Image (tube, rainbow, N blue to C red):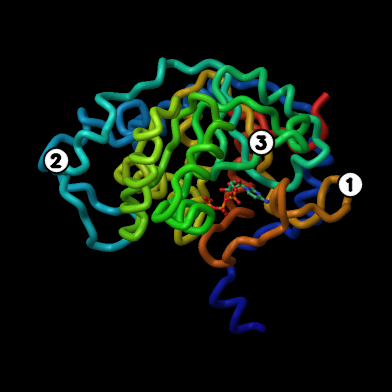
């Protein structure tokens, strides 16, 4: 035991129970802190330039540009005429965005009644093509403006789009005319499914616009949080989106970020609001990410909603 203590002596994450107590102590008290908001926007602009860099665009990734995969060492893809025409011209978002809601997928959203609150935001970001079916509407809302899609979902849920593309195109209708934000250049095996998803939507004249996450942006955001104590192979999608929102929005509210198995009422909480499939343990460090988000909440830089919405 002593030996382990000497190897990992400095940092211990609080236990789930301690976090519950801390959140309950804080209660609903929250005060917006414009200085904190401005500071984080500046820090994120200086490190990562989200306005210009969050997506791969014709402007930041011209023909011949080498895109380095952020999730793999020494893999790259040069922009040629097989990918360049698929990129949007420039950042398509109308900036600045005003009140943004970033919705994680935690089971804490179940029975939260936060759907109305979420739907009131000016710009709503969601993770990993989450279900928005009737049974969840009261808790998570219906509207969305930017929805991420990991290539692994295309593989698992839609047979890599090698067979029918109709089920995919139909299920995407739930996201209205959102931007679909895919990390196409993070891991090599993710590129082809992402390009296929682009063509499936384009061929169906879908209202959705595909945006490919810029691997340089993802890498710089990863470094930003690493320097602040988030040690994981990769940041979670939710933290990437919160970082994007802090860079682009005047106000950020985060819902559905609670990677713990007990809730504020000390009852069990499922991992997702729609199932209880646990993530691969060593890939993300969601509890560490939560601690960072909680600091930002306490400092008034963003607001986290963890309980019932009024
Ligand atoms: N999340 C959370 N607590 C949970 C579940 C999810 O805080 N119990 C947040 C995380 O930031 C996560 C996001 O919500 O990235 C979306 O959840 P999910 O779809 O489960 O993400 P993962 O599948 O784990 O994958 P990834 O983050 O790699 O996209």
Residue 288 location (% of width, % of height)? 59, 53
What residue is drawn where x is 43% and y is 29%? 206
Give whichever of discs 3 and 1 has the lower sequence position. Answer: 3
Does the residue tagged 3 have its C-beta within 8 Å of any atom of ligand 1?
no
Q: Which mark is residue 304?
A: none
Q: Position of residue 211 (x, y in %)?
A: 37, 34
Earlier residue among tags 2 and 3: 2
Percent from the top left, x then y, of residue 63?
A: 12, 38
For the residue labelled by badge 1, is the local secondary structure a helix, a strand or a loop? loop
Q: Are marks 3 and 1 in contact (CB under 8 Å)?
A: no
Specify whether residue 239 is in view.
yes
Give left or right: position of 109 versus 279: right
Residue at the spot 27% in from the left edge and 24% down from the top edge: 90
Q: Please report the residue visible at 23 percent of the width from the left and 62 percent of the height from the top.
A: 74
Which numbered mark, 1 or 2, is in the foreground of this view? 2
Query: Mark 3 sits on what residue?
Result: 132
Q: Give the image location of residue 76, x and y in percent.
A: 21, 55
Of the 4 image quadrants, the one containing the N terminus is bottom right
Residue 213, located in which quarter of the rendered image?
top left
Per the image, the residue denoted by label 2 is 81
Quarter of the image with the C terminus is top right
For residue 220, which quarter of the picture?
A: top left
215 lies left or right of 42: left
Closest to the observer, 302 or 149: 149
Q: Mark 1 points at which residue?
A: 265
- Which structural element holds mark 2? loop
């Amino acid at each position: 035991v002593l030996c382990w203590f000497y190897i990992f002596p400095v940092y211990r994450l609080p236990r789930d129970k301690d976090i519950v107590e801390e959140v309950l102590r804080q209660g609903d008290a929250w005060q917006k802190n414009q200085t904190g908001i401005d500071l984080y926007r500046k820090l994120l602009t200086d490190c990562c330039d989200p306005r210009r860099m969050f997506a791969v665009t014709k402007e930041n990734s011209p023909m011949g540009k080498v895109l380095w995969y952020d999730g793999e060492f020494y893999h790259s893809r040069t922009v040629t005429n097989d990918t360049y025409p698929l990129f949007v011209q420039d950042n398509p978002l109308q900036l600045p965005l005003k009140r943004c809601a970033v919705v994680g997928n935690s089971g804490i959203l179940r029975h939260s009644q936060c759907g109305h609150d979420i739907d009131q935001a000016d710009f709503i970001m969601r993770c990993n093509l989450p279900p928005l079916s009737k049974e969840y509407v009261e808790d998570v809302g219906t509207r969305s403006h930017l929805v991420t899609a990991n290539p692994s979902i295309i593989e698992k849920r839609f047979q890599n789009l090698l067979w029918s593309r109709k089920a995919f195109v139909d299920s995407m209708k739930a996201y209205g005319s959102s931007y679909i934000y895919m990390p196409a250049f993070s891991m090599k095996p993710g590129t082809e499914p992402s390009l296929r998803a682009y063509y499936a939507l384009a061929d169906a004249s879908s209202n959705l616009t595909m945006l490919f996450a810029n691997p340089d942006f993802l890498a710089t955001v990863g470094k930003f949080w690493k320097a602040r104590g988030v040690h994981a192979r990769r940041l979670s999608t939710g933290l990437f989106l919160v970082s994007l929102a802090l860079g682009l929005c005047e106000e950020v509210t985060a819902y559905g970020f609670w990677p713990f198995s007990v809730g504020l009422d000390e009852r069990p909480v499922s991992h997702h609001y729609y199932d209880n499939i646990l993530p691969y343990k060593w890939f993300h460090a969601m509890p560490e990410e939560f601690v960072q988000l909680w600091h930002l909440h306490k400092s008034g830089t963003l607001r986290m909603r963890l309980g019932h919405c009024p």
